[in-house]
Image (cartoon, grey):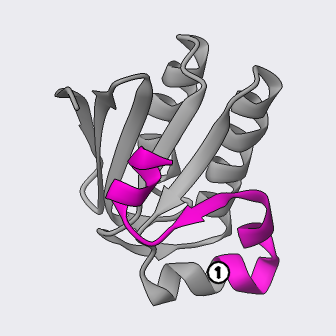
């Protein structure tokens, strides 16, 4: 697969790397996704959807925390990309992040993968 770094965003507690893998935009947030840092992920997700990307993969392996604001960023991206026929895939969630999705029931509306490689192959 062709893997090319596209960009990064950083706000101290959250860093987001963005790259294109084939026709998929891969976002790798590292740190804490909360009401203070949500825009660091929301902006590149929105830009990808605006550019017509219909397959978004969020590699959650380095995401240490996600609050309701972070969850809303992901849900908003899901709604936008599904409106143009796409999907959001979440990969490699840590137990603390997965718990937020379990408690809220949000795990039912995303395609979840144990690893990034599985998400990219799906």
Residue 77 spot, x, y in % from top left: 66, 39
In the picture shown, does residue 118 fall above or below 55? below
> Which quadrant of the rendered structure holds the N terminus?
top left
Question: Which residue is pictured at 48% across the width and 88% down the height?
Answer: 95
- Which secondary structure is most common in the magenta stretch? helix
Q: Which picture quadrant has residue 80?
A: top right
Residue 2 spot, x, y in % from top left: 20, 26
In the picture shown, does residue 85 fall above or below 31? above
Question: Which residue is pictured at 23% across the width and 28% down the height?
Answer: 7
Magenta stretch: give its range.
101-122
Magenta includes 74? Answer: no
Identify residue for label 1: 100
Magenta includes 112? Answer: yes
Question: Which residue is pictured at 53% across the width and 11% down the height?
Answer: 51
82 left or right, relative to 116: right
43 left or right, relative to 75: left
105 left or right, relative to 38: right
Q: Nearer the viewer, residue 93 or 2?
A: 2
Q: Which picture quadrant has residue 46?
A: top right
Question: Which residue is pictured at 58% across the width and 60% down the height?
Answer: 70
Q: Secondary structure at mark 1?
A: helix
Q: Nearer the viewer, residue 75 or 40?
A: 75
In the picture shown, does residue 98 fall above or below 86? below
Q: Nearer the viewer, residue 31 or 84?
A: 84
């Amino acid at each position: 697969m062709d893997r090319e770094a596209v960009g990064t965003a950083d706000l101290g507690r959250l860093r987001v790397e963005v790259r294109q893998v084939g026709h998929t935009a891969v976002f790798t947030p590292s740190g804490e996704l909360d009401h203070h840092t949500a825009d660091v992920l929301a902006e590149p997700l929105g830009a990808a959807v605006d550019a017509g990307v219909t397959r978004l993969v969020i590699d959650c392996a380095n995401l240490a925390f996600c609050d309701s604001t972070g969850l809303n960023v992901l849900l908003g991206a899901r709604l936008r990309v599904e409106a143009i026929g796409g999907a959001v895939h979440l990969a490699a969630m840590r137990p603390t992040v997965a718990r937020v999705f379990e408690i809220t029931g949000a795990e039912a509306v995303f395609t979840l993968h144990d690893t990034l490689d599985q998400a990219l192959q799906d």
